[in-house]
Structures are given as structure tokens and as C-alpha cells.
Amino acid sequence: MYMFPGVAVITGAGGTGIGAATAKAFAAAGCKMIAITDLNEKTLQQTAESITSTHPETEVLVKAGNVADDQFADSFIDTVVWRFGRLDYAVNCAGVIGKSLRSSETSLEEFDRVNNINYRGCWLSSRAELKQMVTQEALPSHDPNRPPQRGAVVNVASQLGIVSRPGAPAYCASKSAVVGMTRADAIDYSKDGIRVNCVCPGVIETPLVMEKAEVREAIMPAVETAPMKRMGQPAEVADAILFLCSTQASFVQGHAMVVDGGYITL
Ligand SMILES: NC(=O)c1ccc[n+]([C@@H]2O[C@H](COP(=O)([O-])OP(=O)(O)OC[C@H]3O[C@@H](n4cnc5c(N)ncnc54)[C@H](O)[C@@H]3O)[C@@H](O)[C@H]2O)c1
């Protein structure tokens, strides 16, 4: 059983995808202070309402915006700290999928769009989060075998940050960048008592892959190939994220945890 006595922050938490499932999982695990953001204000409100209707004791801070905008990324974390005083578990989940094109067919605009949100947005969010985490006291440890934790960051990369698929150079590169950034931050912030890890989901049944027929088509071969031969559910990724945020993962640092039905083992 996890304990989350601190403050959780989740980007990309609108809709019915991994970010929303993570925010709901934090509430279900007893986290009482949750801040969520997304570009889509309407679906973000829906996530907040879903949490407060099932967990009325949980306070949910909602602020819509674009994680690729440095001013927004900083001001979101400023608002979290103003409201809750600190931040303990940061999950950087906002992301988009690119068009299925080879490099020679990909426009600069498309390359920049994908990388600005998936990589730059993730870096801007984690930069703002780490800036706050280094200034705050660690939460006291309830377990003599585990040191106090000053903060835990989980970036959402992809199985395509580890291996690649046809027609996705910008997306694969953006997610490899998130894996590399995670490892670099893990090295830099270990001495501060902050853990930085990432999850690398396989094909997960979310609007990102289900909404457009062309995306579903491009992605289906990966589902057929993976040993478990099914899509994952957002809650299955949320469970891995909660583990990495929890003090049960107190010695897990700079890890890229694949949650992919075995896809990358092939
Ligand atoms: N679904 C999958 O198969 C899969 C696989 C591997 C990795 N991922 C990654 O998981 C993360 C979540 O994706 P999902 O599948 O839950 O998709 P999703 O579309 O349900 O969620 C992504 C959310 O990010 C938000 N978003 C997009 N651009 C944003 C921006 N600039 N600023 C703020 N919010 C923004 C969207 O509005 C959306 O609510 C993404 O980073 C995605 O790359 C998904």
C-alpha cells in the first residue's frame, strides 16, 4: 500500500488517457493535494470533477495551458506552490503523436511541433518542478529503511524512446530525448534527495491512438507483434507511475520502465 502525503502534479491530465488515469490513481491512493494541467480546459475540468466526485476530501488545482510555453510551465508550478506550499510527485505526461512520415517527407513545422511538446515541454515542466523541489525540505520518512524523499519526477516517454517504428522519426527522437533527459537529471539530482525516472508505455488504449483511423492503422502492427497481443490500459501505466513516485521505489533512479506487454523484448 502506497502513501502519498505530499502534493502531486500531472501534466496532460485532461481526457481519458494516461495523465487523467494517473491523477485519478493518486486520488484513489490517498493523495489529498493534486494539481493538473492540460491544453484542453474542458477535458481537464472533467478529470477534476471525476476526482472530486469520488474523493471529495481531495483538493484539485486546475490550470489549463501549454507545456511548451516556458512562461506557462513556470507559472503553473508557481501556482501549485502558492496553493499547496510544495510539490512532491511530478508526472510529465502531456504529449502528441506525430504524422506517420519518413524523415524525407517530414516538414520542419511537424518536427518542431512534436519535439516542442514532447521533449521541450517535458523539459520545461521538469525544470520548473526541479527548481521547486531543490528548495524544499524532504518529507519525513515513515520507514526507517528508507531515506526522506524531497521529490520524485516521472517523465512519460514511450517504448519508441527505446526502439523505433516505421514512419515516426520525430516522435521516436522526442521520446529518446525524454529518456536521455531523465537519466541526466537522475544523476544531477541524486545528491538533493530527488529521484527522476520515466515510464515507456507500449500501445495504450487512449484518444492519442484511438481517435484517428490513420494512427490506429500505423500502430496496430505493434499490438500484433507484442507478446501479450493487446493494448494496455491507461490505469496499467498509472500503476507503474505511482510505484516510481512512491517511497517503495526509494532506490530506483534514472530508470526507463517499459510497460509494453513485452514489445521491446522481441
Ligand atoms: N497511448 C499510447 O499508446 C502511448 C504510448 C507511448 C507513450 N505515450 C505517451 O503518453 C503520454 C500521454 O498520452 P495518452 O496516450 O494518454 O494521450 P492523450 O491524448 O489521451 O493525452 C495527452 C494529453 O496531453 C495534452 N496535451 C497535448 N499537447 C499539450 C500541450 N502542448 N500542453 C499541455 N497539454 C497538452 C492533450 O490535450 C491530452 O489531454 C504522451 O506523452 C504520449 O506520447 C502514449
Image: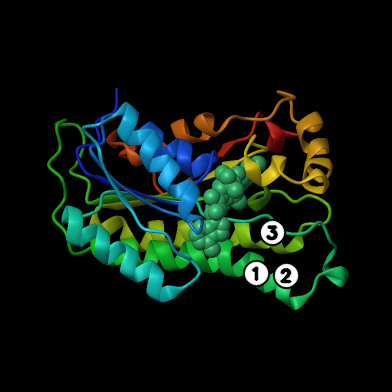
Where does the image place residue 181, in percent across and percent down from the top left?
A: 49, 62
* Residue located at (44% from left, 42% from top): 46
The relative height of residue 149 versus residue 39 in the rendered view (above or below) is above
- Whether disc 1's CB lies below 8 Å from ligand 1 is answered no
Secondary structure of the residue carrying tag 3 is: helix
Q: Amino acid at mark 3?
A: Tyr
C-alpha span from label 3 to label 2: 10 Å
* Disc 3 + disc 2, Cβ < 8 Å: no
The relative height of residue 265 versus residue 119 in the rendered view (above or below) is above
**Residue 60 in sight here:** yes
The residue under label 3 is: 171
**Residue 158 in sight here:** no
- In this rendered view, identify the residue nearer to me: 208 or 168: 208
Q: Amino acid at mark 2?
A: Glu
Marks 1, 3: nearer the viewer: 1
- Per the rendering, the mark at residue 110 is 2
The local crowd at label 1, few if under 14, some if 14 to 19, many if 20 or more residues have their Cα within 10 Å, is: some
* Residue located at (47% from left, 73% from top): 69
The residue under label 1 is: 113
The relative height of residue 111 versus residue 82 in the rendered view (above or below) is below
Q: How is the image coloured?
A: rainbow
Secondary structure of the residue carrying tag 2 is: helix
Secondary structure of the residue carrying tag 1 is: helix
- Per the rendering, the mark at residue 36 is none
Query: Of callouts 3 and 2, which one flags the residue occurring earlier in the amino acid sequence?
Result: 2
Marks 3, 2: nearer the viewer: 2
Where does the image place residue 141, in percent across and percent down from the top left?
A: 15, 38
